[in-house]
Image (cartoon, rainbow, N blue to C red):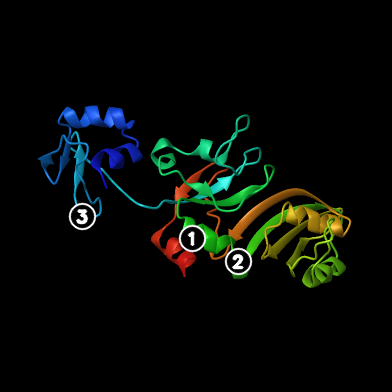
Amino acid sequence: MRIDKLLANLGYGSRKEVKRLLKSGAVKIDGETVKDAKEHVDPKINQVTVHGETVEYKEFIYLMMNKPQGVLSATEDAYQETVLDLLELEDAIYKPFPVGRLDKDTEGLLLLTNDGQLAHRLLSPKKHVPKTYFAIIDGEVTEEDVEAFRKGVTLDDGYLTKPGELKILKSGIRSDIELTITEGKFHQVKRMFEAVGKRVVYLKRNSMGPLRLDEDLELGEYRELTDEEIESLQN
């Protein structure tokens, strides 16, 4: 990779600004000053420093976010805040994107990465990756609903969902439930409950495949995945 491209990708400025940085003698590769923007470097092998500080390079970034309500699961929007707007520049420069989506008014686990291969694997309908949600339902959720979800329910457009595992945590005028599904249709959880005559008033995703939301993350906060978490997603 060319040194100017590497530094520009890591947020050291535009190509033009990086060239000025190189001409100033601030950049070294393995201790040798480099001024030629076309110089090639292997960031996995060579040590690159800028003003004496080692440049940390990684090809992929994996972030776990506790998405708050009111924020779009998108990379950009002209009018509304997106999950990328919540990232620090040092993470945003890797250009991660949300893996799947959470509705604007849904909270909880959202994975952001620039690893397209992993994202494709997690989102592929063939993989049946389970996603677990906590929800508060307006209405009493019954064992009949549990059985209906187990068989699959018909949505408003005629689509029959795959079986879902519904657990009643608290039943009453308002019910607390946990639901695990293996699909990701538009507004699926809300539409599944509408199919049995009930309404979701609060929704939070707690897990996606083996990845569970870190409860220490406040709404809007995020952290990098651990090596163990990354490995669990890749297997």
Distance between the Cα atoms at labels 1 and 3?
A: 25 Å
Q: Residue furthest right?
A: 197
Tell me the amino acid under the disc marked 1. Leu
The mark found on residue 45 in the picture is: 3
* Upstream in sequence: badge 2 or badge 3: 3
Residue behind mark 1: 118
Q: Residue furthest left?
A: 32
Pinpoint residue 45: horizontal percent, then vertical percent. 21, 55
Q: Which SS class for mark 3?
A: loop
Pinpoint residue 44: horizontal percent, then vertical percent. 25, 54
Front residue of 151/123: it is: 123
* Upstream in sequence: badge 1 or badge 3: 3
Front residue of 79/217: it is: 79
Find out whether the residues at labels 1 and 3 contact each other: C-beta distance under 8 Å: no
Distance between the Cα atoms at labels 1 and 2?
A: 12 Å
Pinpoint residue 194: horizontal percent, then vertical percent. 84, 55
Instruction: Report whether 25 appears left or right of 180.
Output: left
Question: Alpha-carbon neighbours of circle 3 within 10 Å: few (<14), some, or many (≥20)?
Answer: few
The mark found on residue 129 in the picture is: 2
Question: Alpha-carbon neighbours of circle 1 within 10 Å: few (<14), some, or many (≥20)?
Answer: some
Tell me the amino acid under the disc marked 3. Ile
Q: Which SS class for mark 1?
A: helix
Taking the spot 13% from the left edge, 46% from the top edge, the residue there is 30
Tell me the amino acid under the disc marked 2. Val
Q: How many marks?
A: 3
Q: Residue furthest front?
A: 38
Pinpoint residue 81: horizontal percent, then vertical percent. 59, 34
Question: Alpha-carbon neighbours of circle 2 within 10 Å: few (<14), some, or many (≥20)?
Answer: some
Taking the spot 85% from the left edge, 58% from the top edge, the residue there is 195
The mark found on residue 10 in the picture is: none
